[in-house]
Amino acid sequence: MRVFETAPHMGRVYLRALTERGRPLDGEVPEMRSRLDAQTLDEEHLAAYRVACGARAEVPVGYPQLLATRLHVALLTDPEFPIRAMGMVHPRFSITQHRPLHSGEAVAFESWFDGTREVRNGIEFDIQTRAFVGDELVWQSTAATFHRTHHSKAPEKPAEEPITWDSQPLVVPSNAGRRYARVSGDANPVHLHPLVSRLFGYKRPIAHGWWLVARCLGELGLDGPDAPATFGFDFRRPVFLGGSYSLGRSDQAFAVLDETGKVRLDGFSGTP
């Protein structure tokens, strides 16, 4: 297990991600583990996060993921990890918050890889994360992670079942990528630069997934649950910065919809 006293520097790990070559995966993704020693939740940084994401709670439920992402990127760019990190995407993501967190608390994190599986066009594995205050498990997440190994003709997608949404406009500012990068340190260029975005197949920069999660939960008033709560997200299609979208809600389900009514992100809220 790699142990960090402070969060890894994102600039250095992204430099490794840009220069690494990767190698063929032989078998399963290694069950690499890392730990980040207890970090005090800083109110100034929390305030900057709330502003950048439109979050509202004291410690928004998505905030621990920002801290944990540094562990994830450090593991994905470790020389022992066989796959090139650049180009990986998260098709699904879930969070469980066991109790509210508070500014000033000291939170430690553990992350590891597991669940390697073959899927269409590549492989998936899970990045598991647990957050602790002392010995108390307070928060956890699972991020499915996709690595493309080949291309095949995409099957025709089944028609999406019609849902009656109670919807509201969702603003996705053109500068959201830069604002979130300043707070998170996550300067992945597909969220920042039109040219690089096109190199990865996107017509313009796309929203950070963790920013989009925080924005949706904040807009819906779900980012500060008092009781244990769980949330799931299915990233179906990219959300482009500066685009026109709406946020729909129906019972415990919610979705980001584009101008044509297609679902860009599926989500749900519930109890563990």
Image: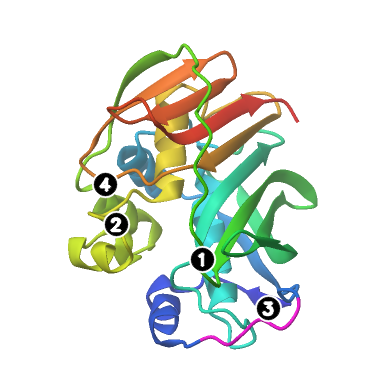
Q: Is residue 248 above or below residue 178?
A: above
Q: Is residue 203 magenta?
A: no
Compute the Cα span from label 4 to label 2.
16 Å
**Gap between marks 4 and 3, in whole Å?**
32 Å
Give the camera-side residue of 212 and 68: 212
Find the magenta span and give its range.
22-27
Labels 2 and 3: the sequence-earlier one: 3
Q: Amino acid at mark 3?
A: Arg
Judging by the rendered image, the residue that carries numbered circle 1 is: 70
Q: Amino acid at mark 1?
A: Arg
Closer to viewer: mark 4 or mark 3: 4
Q: Which residue is mark 4?
A: 176
Earlier along the polypeptide chain: callout 1 or callout 3?
Answer: 3
Q: Amino acid at mark 4?
A: Ala
Marks 1 and 3, how far apart in space?
Answer: 13 Å
Q: What secondary structure is found at the residue carrying circle 3?
A: strand
Instruction: Report x, y in % for residue 223.
Output: 51, 30
What count of labels does the image hold? 4
- Quadrant housing the C terminus: top right
Label 2 residue SS: loop
> Going by the image, does 114 lie left or right of 158?
right
- Given residues 213 and 38, the one toward you in this image is 213
Q: Which residue is mark 2?
A: 202
Please give the residue where the numbered disc 3 appears in the rendered image: 2
Badge 4: residue crowd in 10 Å (few <14, some 14–19, many ≥20): many
